[in-house]
Image (cartoon, grey):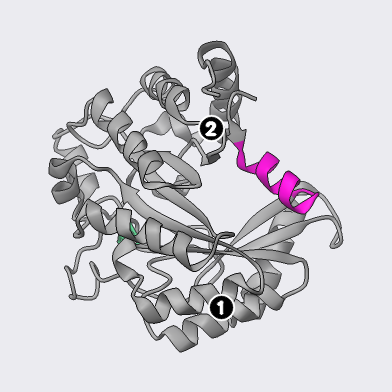
Amino acid sequence: MVYRSVSSFYKDKFGCKVYKISLDAGCTCPTRDGTKGTGGCIFCSESGSGDFAAARSLPIEEQIEQAKQKVLAKIGSNKSAGKFIAYFQNFTNTYGNIQRLEALWLKAAQAENIVGVAIATRPDCLEEPVLQAIARLCKKTFVSVELGLQTTNEKSIKYIRRNYETSVYDESVFKLHQISKEIHVVTHIIFGLPGETEEDMLNTVRHSIKAGTDGIKIALLHVLKNTDLAEDYLTHKFECLSMDQYFALLAEALSIIPQNIVIHRLTGDGAKKLLIAPLWTADKKHVHNELEKYLLKNVKPML
Ligand code: SF4
């Protein structure tokens, strides 16, 4: 493997295959509820980047059970086969009543065969009480906090309506590492934002490495139905990356990412039913196979 994949990271850490199950804690985002805006990030789907999570109306225990069954049915295995990470994916999972959220994280951590909790959030939603709650959780289980950075290009930051300064991301990575040495910080980055050059995208990767991220998730920009991004795409304001362009960018990115940083994802994960473009991403198996072949040929790993 030319990079440190998340599956090998989990295997080393937990000694077995680990699957992430998507959960919905019933949160919103400051860019949706009027605090910092109402439309959300320009690319984000109505479900808050969590189109595969179980229904938010269900209690967390039921969500976990359903999500586990879904994974096991997909891999054709029985109940004892796998271990899971409870992934609070939809919206901003540290935004809201922190006692309620902490109780959900703890319930998830205690469920059968759950070996860790992953919390997707925004770097500007990690105030002191939240950090303290995360620190307490770190004493009970493996914790990963996933931060939506997306880009460090100023023009893009405005365009996507991210609504926080990049320095806030830097401080958050620092503070998370301060509360626990064991915490695993993952940075979400998007490639293919309108108007961004290769250098812009690689600069975002460089920035997250310098900030001290432990993991990186790169997603190709997906245009999803019912988003403002879709309007710009359908009125020809920008074009999406082709498969060749995206693979070449990934090869460049992986060449500058040190091997101690875990690569959590290299492809987008948009729901097929919402996807407008790029349509070549719809055949996930094909994309995955072609990407592996391409990277083997074209990446010289950084040691
Ligand atoms: S913060 Fe995340 S979940 Fe919320 S609107 Fe932006 S991308 Fe979507």
What is the magenta range? 5-17
Residue 231 visible in this rendered orientation of the protein: yes
- Quick check: marks 2 and 1 in contact, CB under 8 Å? no
Q: Is residue 125 above or below residue 198?
A: below
Residue 26 visible in this rendered orientation of the protein: no
Answer with mark 2 or mark 1, whichever residue precedes in sequence.
1
Residue 249: where, in percent of width, then height? 38, 23
Q: Quadrant of ligand 1?
A: bottom left
Residue occupying the point 56% across, 11% down: 297
10 Å crowding of disc 1: few (<14), some (14-19), many (20+)? some
Q: Is residue 98 above or below residue 271?
A: below
Q: Which residue is mark 1?
A: 136
Task: Name the foreground residue: 209 vs 247.
Answer: 209
Q: Is residue 299 left or right of residue 37?
A: right
- What amino acid is labelled 1 in the image? Arg
In which quadrant of the rendered image does the C terminus lie? top right
- What amino acid is labelled 2 in the image? Asp
In which quadrant of the rendered image does the N terminus lie? top right
Q: Nearer the viewer, mark 2 or mark 1?
A: 1
Q: Is residue 262 above or below residue 297?
A: below
**How many tags in the picture?**
2
Residue occupying the point 84% across, 52% down: 77
Q: Secondary structure at mark 2?
A: loop
Residue 171 appears in which quarter of the rendering? bottom left
Q: Which residue is mark 2?
A: 283
Q: Is residue 78 above or below residue 98?
A: above
Task: Name the foreground residue: 223 vs 122.
Answer: 122
Residue occupying the point 50% across, 73% down: 134
Residue 288: where, in percent of width, then height? 57, 29
Residue 125 is covered by the magenta coloring: no
Q: Main secondary structure of the magenta part?
A: helix
Task: Name the foreground residue: 9 vs 181.
Answer: 181
